[in-house]
Image: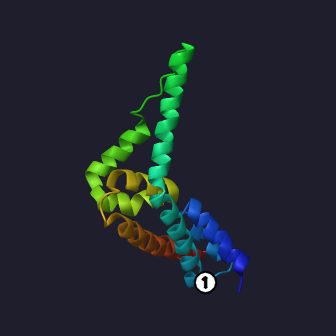
Amino acid sequence: MHWHLYISLFGLSMIKFMFAPFGGPAMKLNFLETYLSCVAGAFVAAFIFYFSSEFFMIRAHKKRKALLHASITNGTPLKYKPKFTRFNKLIVKLKRRLGIYGIAFYAPLFLSVPVGSIVTAKFYGKEKRTFPLILLGICINGAVTTGLAYGIKALF
């Protein structure tokens, strides 16, 4: 068994799930080994970041509040940071257009598993079906991207 190869795919898919399966053919792993390593890594990252997303949101809020308080006490103006950036507008547009299924399926794939899980938890964290939908999306997207990786390998 090639544990170091499995662990490297596992770690890469915790960060960027979309590109991790493309390392499998280069490492001479078969489809199932690549798929299971990548999906397992994405599951672990989704679990960690989905259920700790409230901590990250509270921490960001406290940090913004402390910066505002510090700027008021020092008398220095706080640098304006726009809230309606292109990225935020894109996420809200996708939320309205695709709904819970689109965000839960595609945010972990296209953004990254940590950011996608936090965004999904922020929008739909109160619904019970959100986390299972993330896991289902990871399974389906993992099969598609791993199949694509091995399909490209077969062509060349």
Q: Which residue is drawn at 71% across and 87% down?
A: 1
Q: Out of 31 and 67, give the one closest to the viewer.
A: 67
Q: Residue at x 27, y 51 (%)?
A: 97
**For residue 36, which quarter of the picture?**
bottom right
Q: Residue at x 67, y 73 (%)?
A: 7
Residue 7, visible in the rendered structure: yes
User: Mark 1 is on which residue type?
Assistant: Asn
The chosen color scheme is rainbow
Which residue does the numbered mark 1 point to in the structure image? 30
**For residue 156, which quarter of the picture?**
bottom right
Q: Out of 122 and 73, give the one closest to the viewer.
A: 73
Position of 59 relative to 50 (above/below): above
Q: Residues within 10 Å of mark 1 (few under 14, many from 20)?
A: few
Q: Is 23 positioned to the left or the right of 80 in the image? A: right
- Residue 127: give x, y in percent of width and height: 29, 61
- Residue 30: give x, y in percent of width and height: 61, 84
Q: Which residue lies furthest to the bottom in this view?
A: 1
Q: Residue at x 31, y 67 (%)?
A: 129
SS category of the residue bearing label 1: loop
Q: How many labels does the image show?
A: 1
**For residue 104, which quarter of the picture?**
bottom left
Position of 91 relative to 139 (above/below): above
- Residue 149: give x, y in percent of width and height: 55, 72
Position of 121 relative to 78 (above/below): below
Q: Which residue lies furthest to the top in this view?
A: 75
- Residue 12: give x, y in percent of width and height: 62, 64
